[in-house]
Amino acid sequence: MSNPTLLILAGDGIGPEVMNEVKRIITWYGDKRDMPFDISEDLVGGCAYDKHGTPLHDDTMAKAQEVDAVLLGAVGGPKYDDLDFSVKPERGLLRLRKEMDLFSNLRPAQCFDALADFSSLKRDIVAGLDIMIVRELTSGVYFGEPRGIHLEGNERVGINTQRYTESEIARVARSAFELARRRSNRVCSMEKANVMESGVLWRQVVTEIHEKEYADVELSHMYADNGAMQLVRNPKQFDVIVTDNLFGDLLSDAAAMLTGSLGMLPSASLGLPMANGRPKALYEPVHGSAPDITGQGKANPIACILSFAMALRYSFDAGAEADRLEAAVEQVLADGARTADLLGPEGGSPISTTQMGDAILAAL
Amino acid sequence: MSNPTLLILAGDGIGPEVMNEVKRIITWYGDKRDMPFDISEDLVGGCAYDKHGTPLHDDTMAKAQEVDAVLLGAVGGPKYDDLDFSVKPERGLLRLRKEMDLFSNLRPAQCFDALADFSSLKRDIVAGLDIMIVRELTSGVYFGEPRGIHLEGNERVGINTQRYTESEIARVARSAFELARRRSNRVCSMEKANVMESGVLWRQVVTEIHEKEYADVELSHMYADNGAMQLVRNPKQFDVIVTDNLFGDLLSDAAAMLTGSLGMLPSASLGLPMANGRPKALYEPVHGSAPDITGQGKANPIACILSFAMALRYSFDAGAEADRLEAAVEQVLADGARTADLLGPEGGSPISTTQMGDAILAAL
Ligand SMILES: CC(C)[C@H](C(=O)O)[C@@H](O)C(=O)O
Ligand SMILES: CC(C)[C@H](C(=O)O)[C@@H](O)C(=O)O
């Protein structure tokens, strides 16, 4: 049997730096746990634009469709701010999501005990927090047509279309219910059904799927504005949250920030099963390309490393190996290893990106 | 000269209870400050539906167009949850906003010193917080066409349209810049220009208005997901935030919750100047109809009272009188007056809605 395949798209900014540490972890799994991966690498985002004039070359897109999983670092940077909309670094990422049909974006918002004091929220509000936001990732206002800027008389008009079909809602709802069954068995669905018909349909379909297929899971509904409030007020009330592409973008970022562990949070974007039974999948840290600290060895590689742990769990059916990697991360944190972003106002001396990688390898 | 006119739409749930206290304050201004108002009252929301089968009767709409300002309590309740979309209580409120063309929704997120410990955020993150969110209120995905649920083959499809014209963006941007000049002179504009063309146009127009008319104001731009994060991380970095209808809905609710003063926050929705020079205007508390405590005399009337203070400031050019009312509220809080929602985990004995009204009148 051939080795599972990974495509690494390190991208821009701190992407390559944090991905270097992930590559060492992957090598460790090959050497020490007899889990060898075949790795290829390519460009996405600004660096792809620099080389090819497009943030994602067709060949790269084709490769992404063939591998077992894609690992992505980060895209974007000030250098690309003035590029035309159609070739901005983000378009590369959005094309991957859309063409791989990665409809279910799993964003854990987890508060690491060693970092609870880092949150802007009070410790008791966030300590032990562990929620999972399931964001629809291939539809909604991100991709709906018509879209664009046109003239009406001599006025410019900007248009985007929020569009959801029944089956698009159903499949992401199922993925949330499945996850809930392996967690605390509760799903809260968020939309603006009081204002938007797409939200009315969202609520209807989630309710139908629940009644027919997942009646054992506890389901509640919340308007997304109230959801934003409740995440700030008392995030621990939630287990799994399922929501659309745009609400998911804002709510998952707010939730990530609550934990105080922003530089630590991974994500998985999953699609339909391939011929080999594995889902199409892309894994990436929640943080961005952090141009301000690029090339200084300061970046925290943990979010990217934990994204690989998610790959072990969701693509390679290696939950125990994912647990092992996550435990190693918890341990180095408990032992006091801190990259610059993890130092509180008290200060202390930070370790480098590579040193954090070393520490995690040692803990493994 | 005839008295200025107010239309009171107390609405559902705790709306009538909190509005009663506002009426006493209005009477006080007539008696003691020689500022008599002519008041009429009518129905909006569920109670209007109960009586007329519509959440806003045409006659009420016509009255709202004629008065100098509308004061609204709250709409909605579980009794109306299963109503058809087109007659839900919220539609009454949305119709008022749209037909009065109230494009600029001012939502102060202010942390009252006496309540800083109430926030789920650490005291130093929120103490002294005073930001103003200016939300576009008459356009965007709330009102864009086409919209609705239809069948494609045998699948239901839900659609809404995010649509902004240049002039819609320009007028709300101007209102944000004007406000900033009277505050700390900084505006941060939020959209998703990296994903949505309507956001690209938003950013362009805000930038153009800034360059041409408000170059003295400091302007920055932020993606709305990052905005949600930054509000949680360090809300005091902001002065005025300007954003669209939907982002404004989520971001202003999150910001309100940060302050710990949710039951305290007012809002103003302003439109174009009328013949008498006053803007079309509607004032309402940020909180909802709170069906769980309706009719128990527990509701906090302060948000509604402070909404009247905003009316004094923005409709009746009586800034000093608004200051007086706000100072009275601050004083009763400093003196320890607390409705049930303002009691911390330590407890204490709450005062009633009416007693809070009494206290504020006494402080005046
Ligand atoms: C980079 C950007 C296009 C992207 C999004 O809006 O989805 C990012 O914010 C995210 O959440 O992954
Ligand atoms: C009640 C609802 C229609 C409304 C909105 O979504 O605008 C509310 O959430 C608000 O923010 O005033």
Image (spheres, coloured by chain):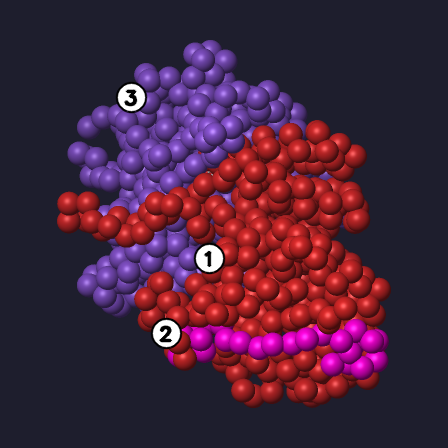
Chain colours: A purple, B red
Residue at 52% from the left image edge and 65% from the top image edge = B62
Mark 3 surroundings within 10 Å by alpha-carbon count, few (fewer than 14), some (14 through 19), many (20 or more): few
Q: Earlier in the sequence, mark 1 or mark 3?
A: 3
Mark 2 surroundings within 10 Å by alpha-carbon count, few (fewer than 14), some (14 through 19), many (20 or more): few
Query: Horizontal and vertical percent for residue A351?
Result: 66, 35
**Can you identify the residue that label 3 sits on?**
A62
Query: Horizontal and vertical percent for residue B245?
Result: 52, 50
B311 inside magenta stretch: no
Left/right placement of residue B17 relative to residue A8 reads: right
Q: CA distance from mark 2 to mark 3?
A: 57 Å
- Helix or strand or loop: what does disc 2 sit on? loop
User: In the image shown, does A6 or B237 lie closer to the viewer?
Assistant: B237
Magenta residues, start to end: B27-50
- Helix or strand or loop: what does disc 3 sit on? helix
**Tag 2–tag 1 contact (CB < 8 Å):** no
**Can you identify the residue that label 1 sits on?**
A224
Chain bearing tag 3 is A
Kind of residue sitting beneath label 1: Ala
